[in-house]
Image (tube, coloured by chain):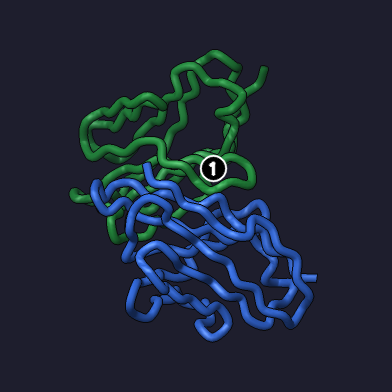
Chain colours: A green, B blue
């Protein structure tokens, strides 16, 4: 599975958009980009995934560059409850595959 | 989405004893479950893949005789830490892949193990 690179930490003001970048320059054609987050002392939570096209759901938007070498997770209106570690993971469909977690980005939403 | 539970949520045990952690998929059957371990301020590391009806697959460096995995049914997998030592103190998390969509994995709330 391709590796990912994320900033160690980021701050975001409450109510503003949080933009979390991820580099995955070695991604292969059949690999997806997944985002999970982990709130302190809890299990990770799925946020969103994409292959080529930008995706949006009730939690977030995922913007994938045309060359697929990087992506950005956007939380449109960050709240204090969005404070968590966000993991960008690249891999095939995870139905029977485990997830390889990197170090992630620790997002702190500031009041 | 699926609900995954773990029991216990926290456990403290003495060095040399064994501890069993349960992972249950509450609303759908899972032939595969994953067990992760997370040390303080570190990321999740896969320990093993639990397979219903067959032996678990362990990651390199994980002792299969120390971390016993039993996938007894399609809704239950157990991880037993045998002869626990303080260095086994960690946050243990299980996950269940979504067999329908195959995109999402559902994680349990985790079990905090402290070995004194």
Chain name for mark 1: A
Q: Residue at x 27, y 54 (%)?
A: B99
Quadrant including the N terminus of chain B = top left
Q: Residue B16: image x %, image y %?
A: 74, 82
Query: Do we see residue A15 in this rendering?
Result: yes
Label 1 sits on residue: A38
Q: Residue at x 40, y 77 (%)?
A: B56
Compared to A34, does A108 lie above or below?
A: above
Indicate whether B20 appears above or below B41: below
Q: Number of numbered discs present?
A: 1
Depth check: give the residue in front, B17 or A96. B17
Name which quarter of the figure residue A1 lies in.
bottom left
Does residue A6 show up?
A: no
* A81 versus B87 height, above or below: above
Apparent side of residue B108 relative to residue B56 in the rendered image (left or right): right
Judging depth in this view, the residue of A93 and B107 nearest the camera is B107
Residue A8, horizontal then vertical, whole percent: 57, 41
Is B58 positioned to the left or the right of B51 in the image?
right
């Amino acid at each position: 599975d391709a590796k990912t690179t994320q900033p160690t930490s980021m701050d975001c003001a409450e109510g503003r958009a949080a933009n979390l970048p991820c580099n995955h320059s070695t991604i292969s054609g059949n690999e997806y980009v997944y985002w999970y987050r982990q709130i302190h002392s809890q299990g990770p939570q799925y946020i969103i995934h994409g292959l080529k096209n930008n995706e949006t759901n009730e939690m977030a938007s995922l913007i994938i560059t045309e060359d697929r070498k990087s992506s950005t997770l956007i939380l449109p209106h960050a709240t204090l409850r969005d404070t968590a570690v966000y993991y960008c993971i690249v891999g095939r469909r995870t139905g029977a595959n485990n997830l390889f977690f990197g170090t992630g980005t620790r997002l702190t939403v500031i009041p | 989405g699926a609900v995954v539970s773990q029991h216990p949520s926290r456990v403290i045990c003495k060095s040399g004893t064994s501890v069993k952690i349960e992972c249950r998929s509450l609303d759908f059957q899972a032939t595969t479950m994953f067990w992760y371990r997370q040390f303080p301020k570190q990321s999740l590391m896969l320990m093993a893949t639990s397979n219903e009806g067959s032996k678990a697959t362990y990651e390199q460096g994980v002792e299969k005789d120390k971390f016993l995995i039993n996938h007894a049914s399609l809704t239950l997998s157990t991880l037993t830490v045998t002869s626990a030592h303080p260095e086994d103190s960690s946050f243990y998390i299980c996950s269940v892949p979504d067999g329908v969509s195959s995109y999402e994995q559902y994680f349990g709330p985790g079990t905090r193990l402290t070995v004194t």
